[in-house]
Image (cartoon, grey):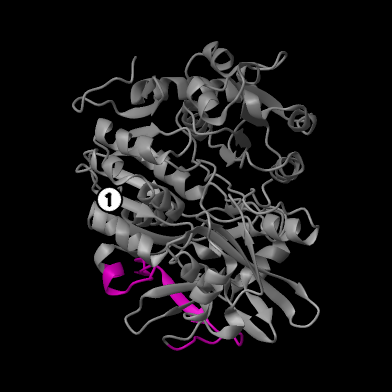
Amino acid sequence: MSAEHGNRNLPSGVISGDRVLDVETLDRRARRVAAAMHDVGIWQGDRVALLLRNDLAYFEATRGAACLGASTVPLNWHLTADEIAHVLDDCNPKLLVAHADLLDESILAVCSDVEVVAVATPPEIATAYGIAPERATVPGGLPEWDSWHAAYKPWTEEPRAVMDPMFYTSGTTGKPKGVRRAKVPPELTAETVQRTARAFGLDRSPLRAVMTGPLYHSAPNAYGMRIVGGGGLLVLQPRFDALELLGLVERYRITNLHMVPTMFIRLLALAEADRQRFDLSSLDFVCHGAAPCPEDIKRAMIDWWGPVIHEYYAMTETGIIATSDSADWLGHPGTVGKAAEGVDLRILGTDGKPMPAGEPGEICVRTALTSFVSYHRASEKTAAMRRGDYVATGDVGYLDEDGFLYISDRISDMVITGGVNVYPAEIENVLVGMDQVSDCAVLGVPDSEFGERLIAFIIGEDGLEEAAIRDYLADKLARYKLPREIRFASELPREDSGKIKKRLLREAYLNGSLPGRDAAVGLG
């Protein structure tokens, strides 16, 4: 079936490139997948690892595992072979489903005890990532996804109790940690699902969305699965492209989007003629999260798209924490919103006591689910996450007098220079307000005199000089917050979620491997 559809009679299901997977076909294929999985020994409580880019197979595998009460483990395909080996050893899956181009020798070498099924990398993904045809083909000796499950009759037994996917955190301060929710009562799971649906704008119909973020992240995964599970239409964009996204919104009359601030920045960088030539009137609810959004960017998006922009603050361990709509944000610029229904939000000082309004501290959360959350095989890290009945987010922030939450920075990113605490996010938010700066990252490195010193990595227009940046910052920041060093680059390493990989930047700086000006900095 071709993906060339008019605006009416759009299918319910998933579209990727020229391929369409309607909900009935998805259900039938997923039940065949369940039968094939069961034949290799998968049953309730077992795990299936997914090393896949956004593809139709992601939904087939997830639904197939759900029929058996098995749990999926979405793998970040940007991880190194050693990091993937750690996750596989930690979660002990019985099956790995992976795109052909991601199954290089180093990955296969760590899968000796895991059944592997390969998915041929589809043309739209191969084109988006520049994958050669020979790498997109299933390696010899491995079962190919479509033929592997096609031999089975659809699974007919009643579905088992569904196990939540186990997502692994990004591991910026150590090895990735698996987040588990064990033995959660069904009514509490339903409460969390509804809170997430409201935050994402998925408590309405019809739903037609473009999947712009990777399904290996918990928020896009929950977003995409909810839309398809609810009978909506989900268009998979193989790799984010701002101009292409606008075309997809017009073509499929898209109602909902899930985005990160980097995508807003790229959309706003389009030529005015390109921004205005598409009909975006179908958009009803655009949510964003995962990373801080500069105030000027947020305001510009609301000016362009109208009051359809919503923000959420969340973490894999707790789910949705706070939400705001456009009116909330315009009335309280910079906020990520108020605590969502059912969320008890507190700002705690170093003594564990609540901080008064306007005073920053550690953001901690309690919901009906937090007592069920733990890190897989990591009891010490689980204990370190807890603050009594609350879970620590690892973020520093404050509540204003109206109860709106503001994020200062990650605790792990805080820099202590000359005995003073400095939050790089504050400096970054100022830097991106400079017209000639399109992206930046600020971090601390060891310093013999001050303990740590601040370094700013800048992506800017040709001709932008360090002196101009220093003059701009000097008017807006206290002297102790000014970076001691400024580096220029053409690209900064970011997660698909929009978060900058500061660990890579820091390591590249310390080992002397940073390239010169106008080169990509610290890319792995």
Amino acid at dot 1: Phe
Answer yes or no: is residue 156 visible. no
Above-or-below relation of 356 to 308: below
Answer yes or no: is residue 128 visible. yes
Q: Mark 1 points at which residue?
A: 285
Residue 35 on image: x %, y %: 54, 21
Residue 404 on image: x %, y %: 36, 75
Residue 151 on image: x %, y %: 55, 10
Q: Which of 99 and 282 is in front in this view?
A: 282
Q: Which of 246 and 325 is in front in this view?
A: 246
SS at mark 1 in the image = strand
In this image, 431 relative to 227: left or right?
A: right
Is 336 magenta? The answer is yes
Quarter holding the C terminus is top right
Quarter holding the N terminus is top left
Above-or-below relation of 348 to 103: below
Above-or-below relation of 363 to 212: below
In this image, 165 relative to 298: left or right?
A: right
Q: What stretch is highlighted in magenta?
A: 328-356
Q: Residue at x 36, y 68 (%)?
A: 337
In this image, 30 relative to 179: left or right?
A: left
Residue 375 on image: x %, y %: 65, 57
